[in-house]
Image (spheres, grey):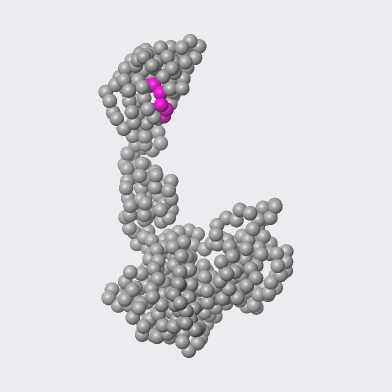
Amino acid sequence: MSMRTAKEHLDTILDELKVAQRQRVPLAEAVGLVLAEDVTAAVDLPGFDNSSMDGYAVQAASLEGADREPVELRIVGELAAGVARDVEVGPGEAARIMTGAPLPAGADAVIPVEQTDGAPDGVVTCRAAVAPGQFVRRRGEDVRAGTAVAWAGNVVGPRTVALIAASGHAECVVHRRPHVLVVPTGDELVPPGEPLAPGQIHDSNSTMLQAAAVAAGATAEILPAVGDDDDALIRALDEAMGRADAIVTTGGVSMGAYDVVKSALKDKGVDFVSVAMQPGKPQGFGHVIESSTRRRVPLFALPGNPVSSYVSFEVFVRPALRRLMGLEPEVRPVHPAIVTTAMRSPAGREQFARAVVTRDAAGHLVAEPVAGQGSHFIADLSRANALLVIPAAVTTVAAGDQVEVVLLDGEVCS
């Protein structure tokens, strides 16, 4: 097999992928997705002049000097939010008003209820002057109808949803969330929770990869494990790929006699290569053809060792899913960190070591490699919150050296 760098393999993958098709979805389903077209306000925000306080709608001129000597105003009506009433306020008059209620005709300001006596007898005593426009939200002062409120390429978040909804829309057009099929392979696999016979193991990779796909923004499902049988794998893919935007297999990509993924798919559009990385040297990628529609579905063939499978997903599949969704950046950024322990790295292979990253008293990142760097150490993989990236040309790292790390769980606080 030809040898390529991790970047070369990722570039090969990304060059083959296009952003997913557009889809109009309810706003709640759009969160985390990328807008495929601009959203224009259908209404003014606010849609009418309204009060920003509970209080009394007045003519500001009626309260001139009220901060020096209280002024009494006659109550002529009451207005609540969501109710439009035919109330008009003249000189020397006031209307009780609630937050969000339409400003009545004739009024040009609101005095908060805290600056009054609460009008116990139909006359309100006001103890403060107000300026015209005070505590009034003017129509369209936030957004004018016909202006753009969100733009193609923006990621929809909770605040974007609020603005789009307030602007009169219940839906928006986004790039569709991809659906991922996770296909475990191997006769030794048993679903989690079921008893093990000699030589069997629980299938942890599938749940891990499903969770990783969901965390990346996709939806995902796990197919039943496929044994070491070429025909069985082909049948399983044929039956399921109609509902898939991407397929991720785990196991069966090395040089062994029972590497079913490689033997079944090497002549069906999947390219199997050796990547100069540790862990995750054996990789496969290509497009398989759905028999009924001839649709090309990208397939990622990942190694079966848990750490290799996870690192491969992080380095190759996660960026690919983000490409399909139009999300940027596609690759997690790297950060400088000081390594606490000396390490050795294989010559000619970029190492993605697992590490626990914290911040020192000065706020700098500090990386402590986990004890178990073998590709089967699931417990240490679970402990790690970062990948420590050692270039292929570097074979030794001393304690205190600066290295690059990829943070897996977001920002490190302490």
Is 211 inside the magenta-drawn segment? Answer: no
Tell me if residue 358 comes above or below residue 113 in the rendering. below
Q: Quadrant of residue 43?
A: top left
Tell me if residue 195 comes above or below residue 45 in the rendering. below
x and y percentages locating residue 7 in the rendered image: 54, 71
Residue at 67% across / 60% down in the picture? 366
Is residue 391 toward the left or the right of residue 58 in the image? right
Tell me if residue 389 comes above or below residue 4 in the rendering. above
Task: Farthest residue to the top: give it.
Answer: 69
Question: In terms of depth relative to the viewer, which is nearer, 141 or 62?
Answer: 62
**What secondary structure predominates along the stretch shown in magenta?**
strand
Residue at 44% across / 18% down in the picture? 116
The total number of labels drawn is 0
Quarter placement of the C terminus? bottom right
Residue at 38% across / 81% down in the picture? 233
The answer to whether residue 18 is seen in the rendering is no
The residue stretch that appears in magenta: 50-57
x and y percentages locating residue 285 in the rendered image: 45, 76
x and y percentages locating residue 11 in the rendered image: 49, 70
Is residue 314 toward the left or the right of residue 341 in the image? left
Is residue 90 toward the left or the right of residue 251 in the image? left
The answer to whether residue 123 is seen in the rendering is yes
x and y percentages locating residue 165 in the rendered image: 35, 44
